């Protein structure tokens, strides 16, 4: 089920390089990051350390801040794969980008939900997207700023881009948190755990236990190793609770989440630039996904050089299906509340 254009959205750029899955031969990759705050700067660092892109650009309205972040990163180029780093308060710095990662938005404060940020961040998207589209019409746009699902839906409406070309980081981070907790409890490497969080990147998100596996064994059939007992329903409930509330704990302790989301964003960008056809739970516009339409939320999806190539029909229990639909209803209501 490939995402289609948002209702009421026309235009887009099907003829461009990003949509066709090609880059002009010989031109190194370029990723621009909008916002040089904790998430944006850490994302730039993560991309440089992993060698995700040859050119990384930072855009921020605070010129002194973006200049300082760029200079600090440039001083470390010797110790990472060769790359060029630049930054500016002028949107022209993003020209020719293959991927634009949008991290700018209202900052989540202790006690706030992600949805509390929606109004200010949607207004910001209205202001910055036209300039970005003017200088980088061919880019794949990855929305990272919160609340990512509602902001992604709004950005699709404002931009006129097709749904494969603009999407959100969704529950890639949440799924990583879940896999870490499962691996820790089961006593195995996190790379041996395959499990997804679906729905909202937020309080209504749901774990897809029905399709979760450990070393290829269905999670609920895991026998336990190294003296550890099999996972119980209480274990699963605790893990779900920790995934939902971990961001609040981190924000209360240090003011922001930045390391893990930066790595998650980098992983998505790698899937795009390297045309990996990787399955990731990103947030894209759904049209008749198990009866769910006209909302952006996360389900397992194939990500490649065209962006979100298609969503994957994933086996779910009746409880999981009901949870996903409830999450969709909550996000649709939130979008309507903010006039999108």
Image (spheres, rainbow, N blue to C red):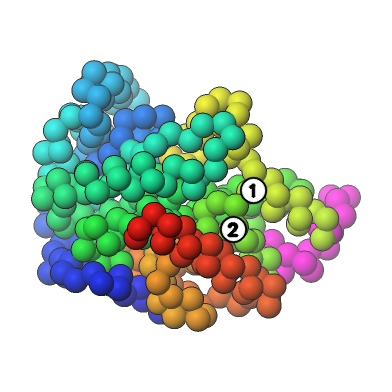
Label 1 vs label 2: CA separation? Answer: 9 Å
Q: Residues within 10 Å of mark 2 (few under 14, many from 20)?
A: many
Q: Main secondary structure of the magenta part?
A: loop
* Front label number (1 vs 2): 2
Q: Is residue 101 left or right of residue 116?
A: left
Residue 49 image position (x, y, % from top left): 38, 34
Residue contact between numbered discs 1 and 2, judged by CB atoms under 8 Å: yes
Q: Is residue 197 left or right of residue 266?
A: right
Query: Residue 167, can we see it?
Result: no
Q: The C terminus appears in which quarter of the rendering?
A: bottom left
Which residue was labeled with disc 2?
A: 205
**Residue at 40%, 77% in the rendered image:** 287
Magenta-span inclusion, residue 271: no
The quadrant holding residue 86 is top left
Magenta-span inclusion, residue 219: yes
**Front-most of 14 and 328?**
328
Q: Residues within 10 Å of mark 1 (few under 14, many from 20)?
A: many
Residue 224 image position (x, y, % from top left): 83, 57
Which residue was labeled with disc 1?
A: 243
**Residue at 58%, 39% in the rendered image:** 247
Q: Is residue 316 left or right of residue 41?
A: right
The quadrant holding residue 131 is top left
The residue range painted magenta reads 211-232
């Amino acid at each position: 089920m490939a995402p289609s254009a948002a209702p009421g959205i026309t235009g887009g750029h099907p003829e461009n390089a990003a949509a066709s899955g090609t880059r002009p031969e010989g031109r190194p990759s370029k990723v621009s990051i909008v916002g040089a705050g904790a998430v944006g700067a850490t994302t730039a660092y993560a991309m440089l350390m992993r060698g995700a892109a040859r050119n990384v650009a930072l855009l921020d309205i605070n010129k002194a801040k973006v200049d300082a972040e760029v200079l600090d990163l440039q001083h470390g180029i010797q110790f990472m794969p060769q790359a060029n780093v630049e930054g500016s308060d002028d949107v022209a710095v993003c020209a020719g980008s293959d991927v634009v990662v949008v991290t700018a938005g209202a900052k989540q404060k202790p006690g706030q939900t992600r949805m509390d940020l929606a109004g200010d961040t949607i207004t910001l998207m209205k202001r910055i997207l036209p300039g970005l589209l003017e200088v980088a019409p061919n880019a794949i746009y990855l929305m990272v700023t919160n609340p990512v699902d509602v902001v992604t839906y709004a950005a699709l409406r404002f931009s006129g881009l097709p749904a494969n070309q603009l999407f959100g980081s969704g529950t890639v981070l949440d799924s990583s948190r879940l896999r870490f907790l499962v691996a820790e409890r089961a006593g195995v490497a996190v790379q041996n755990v395959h499990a997804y969080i679906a729905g909202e990147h937020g309080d209504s998100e749901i774990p897809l236990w029905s399709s979760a596996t450990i070393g290829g064994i269905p999670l609920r059939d895991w026998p336990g190793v190294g003296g550890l007992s099999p996972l119980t329903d209480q274990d699963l409930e605790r893990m779900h609770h920790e995934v939902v509330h971990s961001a609040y704990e981190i924000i209360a302790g240090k003011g922001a989440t930045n390391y893990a989301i930066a790595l998650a964003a980098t992983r998505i960008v790698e899937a795009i630039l390297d045309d990996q056809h990787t399955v990731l739970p990103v947030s894209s516009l759904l049209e008749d996904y198990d009866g769910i339409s006209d909302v952006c939320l996360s389900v397992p999806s194939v990500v490649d050089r065209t962006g979100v190539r298609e969503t994957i029909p994933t086996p779910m229990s009746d409880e999981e299906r009901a949870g996903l639909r409830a999450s969709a209803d909550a996000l649709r209501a939130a979008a309507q509340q903010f006039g999108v």
